[in-house]
Image (cartoon, helix red, strand yellow):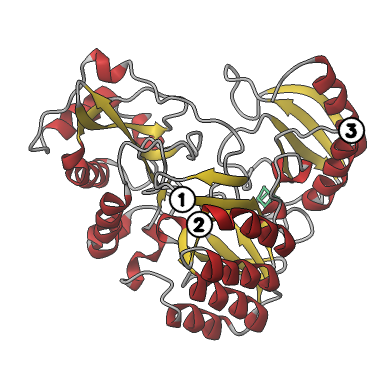
Amino acid sequence: MLRIVPALDGGICRIKLAGGSITAPQALAVAQAAQLYAHGVIEATNRGNLQIRGIGEQQDALIQALLGAGLGPRNLDSDDVRNLMLSPSAGLDPHMLLDTRPLAAHILGALEGNPRFHDLSPKFAISLDGGEGLVMLEHPHDLWLSALQLEGENLLAFGFAGCPGQDSPLAAVPVEHGLELVLAVLELFLDTARPEQVRMRQLLAQIPAAQLLEQLATRLSVELRTDQKVTDWRRAPVAADQHIGIYPQHETGKVAVGGVAPLGRLNPEMLSAIAQLAAEAGDGSLRLTPWQSVLLPNVPTEQAQYVLAGLQAAGLLCSAEQALAHMIACTGATDCSKGLADTKGDARILAAQLQKNGLSRAVHLTACQRSCAAAHRAQVTLLAVSAGHYDLYFRDAAQPGFGVLQARDLTIEAAGALLIADSRSSTHD
Ligand code: SF4
């Protein structure tokens, strides 16, 4: 948040939110700052954060306004490393095995408070899954942790440079040793990695995971569980699209209500309307999700439809039937110098074409290979090759990168026609 990054359309300020959560007054402050000091474009990121784009010369005023609203880190040096992803329904989810919020607060406290950890790369990231039904399991993290119960014991399974949706754990510790484990992994990484190895996958290319695990074991006061019951365990998959619409909570009589920011973008009016709704009918907080959507938690069940209608009126996509709700697109050529195509404009054309045919597909449009918009591999990727033209890939677990190349140099309309034909002949999504 303190380091404004330049882009074609002006500066970008990323506001990292603890557990994706922001209060309604803070959201109003973000909306106001985007209006006053930038061009009014606010983005919901795939890490559950917010960012303001198009910042002009009043960078300092913008940062001061955000700091004044209580956003930003407690320790200014730690802003970059506060990368901990939780489920958007952490602490509220009917399926959770663990309320991850207290442990998350301790981990964030350590990242902020321990100067040693400020040497971590701004990209080094941790995920903490409490067994919730509304959780992103496919974003790779340098360290991932997942709650599981074995023989009546509550454990935290973990792995390196991967994600619980695709990998089995390396080992597990009792939940009460979770903080000790995370701190030990971070220390081990910093002690072992060479300066050019800033991510866990780079370290693993040099030191096998089993060897790292042995070293980790010597730093812990508890024995690592590496028996087959742990290493064969796989996280149960979760249903798709649960972030859209009404989601039940653990507590009877309360629900969470959410909608997708179209192509990840909000404007100050939208964010203000959502914040007001949260204050009026929710618990006064908003949660940003890895699907670039917003969730209002703790809405009384009888208010759910009212809130849903309010989110829709604010401009969020609140039905899984809306094709645009399943599309993600990077900034694109309009605002990024690396972009070869206007991905956001083309995504709208494609969504309209699919909608007309009663279809929705999870499509990722990327204006260059860097794939900023997707931390995971989408079912379908359109990689720009020139303005309005894309190569089409279908995800394939056996293939690296975007998956299997299906067709080259398609116009967006031709890509749409191919997706429509494919959907009619198969059941991809
Ligand atoms: S994927 Fe490429 S074109 Fe798109 S925002 Fe990232 S760097 Fe820019």
Q: Point out the tag, 2 or 3, that comes first from the N-terminus.
A: 2
- Local crowd at mark 1 within 10 Å, few (<14), some, or many (≥20)? few
Provide the residue designation for mark 1. Answer: 253
Q: On the rendered structure, is 89 left or right of 386? A: left
Q: Residues within 10 Å of mark 3 (few under 14, many from 20)?
A: few
Dot 2 beta carbon under 8 Å from ligand 1: no
Mark 1 vs ligand 1: CB below 8 Å: no
Q: Amino acid at mark 1?
A: Gly
Most distant residue in the left direction: 221
Q: Quadrant of residue 82?
A: bottom left
Callout 2 crowding tier (Cα within 10 Å): few <14, some 14–19, many ≥20: some
Residue positioned 36% across, 49% down in the render: 91
Q: Quadrant of residue 213?
A: top left
Marks 2,3: beta carbons within 8 A: no
- Is label 1 in a helix, a strand or a loop? loop
Which residue is disc 2 drawn over?
300
Q: Nearer the viewer, residue 58 or 351?
A: 351
Dot placed on the residue nearer the N-terminal end, 2 or 1 = 1
Determine which residue is flagged by label 3: 357
User: Which residue shows up at 24% across the image and 55% down it?
Assistant: 106
The answer to whether residue 275 is seen in the rendering is yes
> Contact, CB < 8 Å: mark 2 with mark 1?
yes
